[in-house]
């Protein structure tokens, strides 16, 4: 594979900058970027999982020190997450054999990035408009959905001050686990809103707990992908890690100077741009209709 | 350079003694192994050879034709074609071929179809059109199979893995020749075969082959072997490196 170390390092730093600035993992930007740079999607996905181990471990350590991490809730999420990741890796192998992996990765990205980008943009533009007429009251959080309160197998989560059924927690963990192994993302961008709005976890422990789960799920994904598909590239991951860690520090500082709504609007735009670029490749006539699979060597 | 001189000298010896009667061809390589390091950016392998016991007059007039090929390890390869479905382009029809050389570099004195007849070339598998790529997948029509086969060759050429160099054989004397074959940066590792085929007036007379080993070297080799033979250990190592990097970052950039 002939790729430029400096370009990869810059990509890591650029995405790291954004993730530091917006407080997101950045996997959902890094994986498409690697694919645009002609890294085979299978390698991009598995290697990105490896990079996320570094960033989430670093983040989870900070939250552990501060005590803003619900380990019990994290472990239940993790049980779902590991199962999901295992299923995802098997799915990944069979899609790859069928020659449809690249397509599924692209479609998943277009759907998720499109939805999340639009939601962020709409929400932040509304917030920006509201901040101009201060009379409007912020929308209250909806009360906990009754169907979740009725579910059996309730467990008490002290740190989060919640008495909650383990079923929605396991399901959420599972879904994020599947996404982690197929899309090469941590899944924070789905987990954080779901924890706040569906599980009603207090916001001060949400980030730490989701980082805890992401860290273990991406660890498992990295090892499982490496063992079954041999698609992890340590050297590539290391370059991205170092770039990402440095970029994140500068991003975090830049983020403090911008307002929350502006940040979210900006991130929404970036996410939509990546979505459009990926979607464009799906709908336009390819310059080369044929491709070589397995054993062709790249 | 010393190696080259020694090689040349070895080829000269039998020519001088002239013990045999039937014309034959002998070849040797400038190097028997190609090591791939992290900075490997492709290289060249020089094939040296001589025509032995040739007719002096025909030799002097360059009447003999030669084809030299360097073929990488063979493997299964799937060729897929994208189709327009539900408004997007998805992989549709596919065909699998066996015995596909992972790489194929060829040098010849003339275009192969001028050197010998189609049947001969097919048997010898000389030239891109004559490689014996066996379709083993779905029941495609002959025309489709041909289209998929041509696409396979075209994609291999565009990746730099298949290469044809007509006129790439240089005669140093009427009997001694050399051909410089390029080895691309993405050369597949494994045992490569260098072949020389000798033709006279369209007739195939003799061939000779030798091997070239392409292997990863140093860190590249260790990482490659670990990733492919011990995926689990490689994965655990990847995780440990990531954790160390993450921990280091949290120490270096500790806030407050």
Image (tube, grey):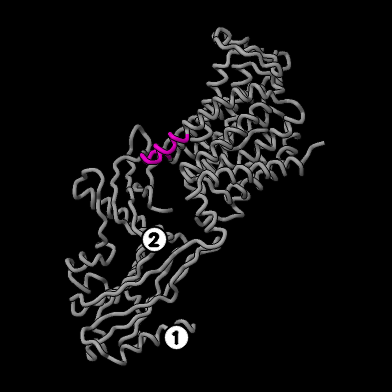
Kindly state the secondary structure of the residue where label 2 is placed: loop
Q: B166 or A139, which is in the foreground?
A: B166
Q: Residues within 10 Å of mark 1 (few under 14, many from 20)?
A: few
Q: Nearer the viewer, mark 2 or mark 1?
A: 1
* Residue that label 2 marks: B161
Q: Position of residue A67 (x, y in %)?
A: 75, 26
Q: Is residue A114 visible?
A: no
Instruction: Pinpoint the chain carrying mark 2.
Output: B
**Occupied quadrant, residue A265:** top right
Q: Position of residue B102 (x, y in %)?
A: 37, 58
Side of A148 relative to B133 (left or right): right
Q: Position of residue A41 (x, y in %)?
A: 47, 43
Side of B86 relative to A78 (left or right): left
Can you say whether A6 is above or below B168 in the image?
A: above
Q: Is residue B212 visible?
A: yes
Q: Is residue A90 magenta?
A: yes
Query: Which portion, as a residue range, is magenta?
Result: A89-101
* Residue that label 1 marks: B5
Determine the CA span between mark 2 and mark 1.
30 Å
Instruction: Pinpoint the chain carrying mark 1.
Output: B
Q: Is residue A98 magenta?
A: yes
Can you say whether B38 is above or below A249 in the image?
A: below
């Amino acid at each position: 594979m002939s790729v430029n170390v400096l370009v990869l390092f810059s990509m890591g730093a650029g995405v790291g900058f954004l993730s530091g600035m917006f407080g997101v993992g950045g996997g959902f930007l890094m994986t498409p970027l690697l694919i645009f740079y002609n890294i085979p999607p299978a390698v991009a996905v598995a290697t990105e999982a490896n990079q996320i181990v570094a960033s989430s471990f670093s983040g989870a350590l900070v939250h552990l020190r501060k005590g803003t991490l619900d380990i019990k809730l994290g472990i239940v999420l993790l049980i779902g997450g590991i199962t999901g990741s295992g299923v995802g890796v098997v799915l990944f192998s069979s899609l790859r054999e069928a020659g449809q992996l690249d397509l599924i990765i692209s479609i998943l990205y277009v759907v998720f990035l499109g939805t999340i980008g639009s939601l962020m943009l709409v929400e932040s533009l509304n917030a920006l408009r509201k901040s101009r007429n201060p009379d409007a009251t912020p929308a209250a959080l909806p009360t906990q959905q009754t169907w979740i309160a009725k579910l059996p197998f309730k467990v008490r989560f002290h740190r989060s001050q919640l008495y909650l059924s383990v079923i929605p927690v396991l399901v959420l963990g599972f879904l994020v686990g599947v996404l982690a192994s197929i899309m090469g993302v941590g899944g924070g961008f789905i987990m954080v809103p779901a924890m706040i709005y569906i599980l009603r976890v207090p916001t001060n422990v949400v980030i730490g707990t989701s980082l805890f789960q992401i860290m273990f799920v991406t660890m498992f994904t990295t090892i499982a992908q490496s063992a079954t598909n041999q698609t992890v590239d340590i050297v590539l991951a290391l370059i991205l890690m170092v770039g990402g860690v440095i970029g994140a520090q500068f991003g975090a500082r830049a983020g403090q100077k911008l307002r929350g709504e502006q940040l979210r609007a900006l991130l929404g735009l970036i996410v939509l741009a990546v979505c459009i670029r990926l979607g464009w490749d799906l709908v336009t006539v390819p310059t080369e209709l044929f491709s070589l699979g397995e054993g062709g060597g790249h | 350079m010393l190696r080259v001189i020694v090689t040349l000298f070895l080829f000269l010896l039998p020519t001088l003694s002239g013990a045999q009667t039937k014309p034959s061809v002998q070849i040797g390589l400038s190097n028997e192994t190609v090591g791939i390091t992290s900075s490997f950016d492709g290289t060249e392998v020089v094939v040296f050879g001589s025509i032995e016991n040739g007719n002096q007059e025909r030799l002097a007039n360059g009447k003999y034709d030669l084809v030299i090929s360097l073929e990488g390890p063979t493997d299964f390869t799937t060729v897929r074609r994208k189709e327009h479905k539900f408004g997007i382009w998805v992989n549709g029809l596919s065909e699998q071929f066996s015995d596909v050389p992972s790489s194929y570099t060829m040098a010849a004195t003339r275009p192969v179809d001028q050197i010998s007849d189609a049947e001969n070339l097919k048997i010898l598998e000389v030239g891109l059109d004559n490689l014996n790529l066996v379709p083993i997948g779905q029941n495609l029509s002959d025309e489709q199979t041909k289209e998929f086969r041509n696409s396979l060759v075209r994609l291999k050429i565009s990746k730099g893995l298949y290469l044809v160099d007509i006129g790439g054989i240089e005669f140093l004397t009427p009997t001694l020749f050399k051909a410089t074959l390029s080895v691309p940066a993405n050369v597949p590792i494994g045992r490569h075969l260098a072949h020389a085929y000798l033709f006279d007036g369209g007739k195939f007379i003799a061939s000779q082959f030798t091997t070239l080993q392409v292997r990863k070297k140093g860190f590249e080799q260790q990482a490659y072997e670990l990733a492919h033979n011990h995926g689990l250990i490689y994965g655990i190592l990847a995780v440990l490196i990531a954790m160390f990097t993450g921990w280091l970052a949290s120490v270096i950039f500790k806030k407050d």
